[in-house]
Image (cartoon, rainbow, N blue to C red):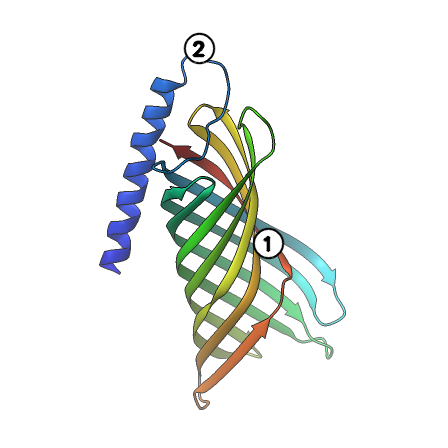
Amino acid sequence: MQPTKFLFIFLFSLLGKSFLYAQEKGGSNEKPDGISISKGLKFSILTFSLSSRNAVNDNNILVNYIDQKKNSWDIRADGGYIIKKDLGVGLGLSYGESKDNNIIKKSDGGLTFNKSFSNDYGIRPYIKNFIPLDNKNRFYIINQTELQFLFDHLVKESTTDDILTRTYTTRNTYGIGLRPGLIIFIVKNFAFETTVDIFGVKRTVERSRISDMPDSKVATTDLNFKINVLKVAFGFSTYF
């Protein structure tokens, strides 16, 4: 993981330097216009997403949660270069974590106590298209077509009738995805950005080790264009 950590540090450093550059160029004497996306520009982006769920006596069709506390977050750093007008290439690196503690009531009245923790890493080279929405270049619709290399690790403990079952799962996903969004330039060179994942084609290989049971392996291939509302990301970008 050392190369990935190095790239994260590099991209965060780039984001900080370009933000200072945007502040210098976006003084009070300049109009609050945006910027024309033209060849030679560089950009850096930092986006994040959060999700939280707390439930008590949540009776669903498949499962009855007596109590549940679930939290997850993701952060992503991007760097890129505009190769021609309104078209850029870049690389995104992401990291996320999720925790879920819950108590489930079974149909026979028994209780199951679950604890799980997962983290995931992502590497996503992409092509990014920009569609201007106004003549001041403040608003852009964007669309990223990206290759996705995602690596998830999950540890889950489940206790029923004082019997503990522990599961270790690794999940590797490879695919091509679409990531549309919107850019709004707050000051020149500095913008607010929001995007959402729309998976296109992906292949996932999942391996699990469960207490006192044989190891399992499941490979799946999916084709869908469903909007993943849990992966709406908000952040900031600079163009310089």
Where residue 218 appears, x then y in whole percent?
Answer: 50, 83
Task: In the rendered structure, find residue 28 and report the number of the disc placed on it.
Answer: 2
Q: What element carries label 2?
A: loop
Instruction: Name the residue at the top extreme.
Output: 29
Marks 1 and 2, the one that precedes in the sequence: 2
Task: In the rendered structure, find residue 230 and report the number of the disc placed on it.
Answer: 1
Find residue 133 and report its image quarter.
top right
Residue in the foreground of this view, choosing between 167 and 20 = 20
- Name the residue located 51 percent from the left edge and 33 percent from the top edge: 192
Residue in the foreground of this view, choosing between 1 and 84 = 84
Where residue 240 appears, x then y in whole percent?
Answer: 35, 31
Position of residue 153 in the picture relative to residue 229 (left or right): left
Residue contact at pointers 1 and 2, CB within 8 angstroms: no
In the rendered structure, which amino acid carries the disc numbered 1? Answer: Leu
Position of residue 179 in the picture relative to residue 45 (left or right): right
Q: Residues within 10 Å of mark 2 (few under 14, many from 20)?
A: few
Where residue 111 appears, x then y in whole percent?
Answer: 64, 72
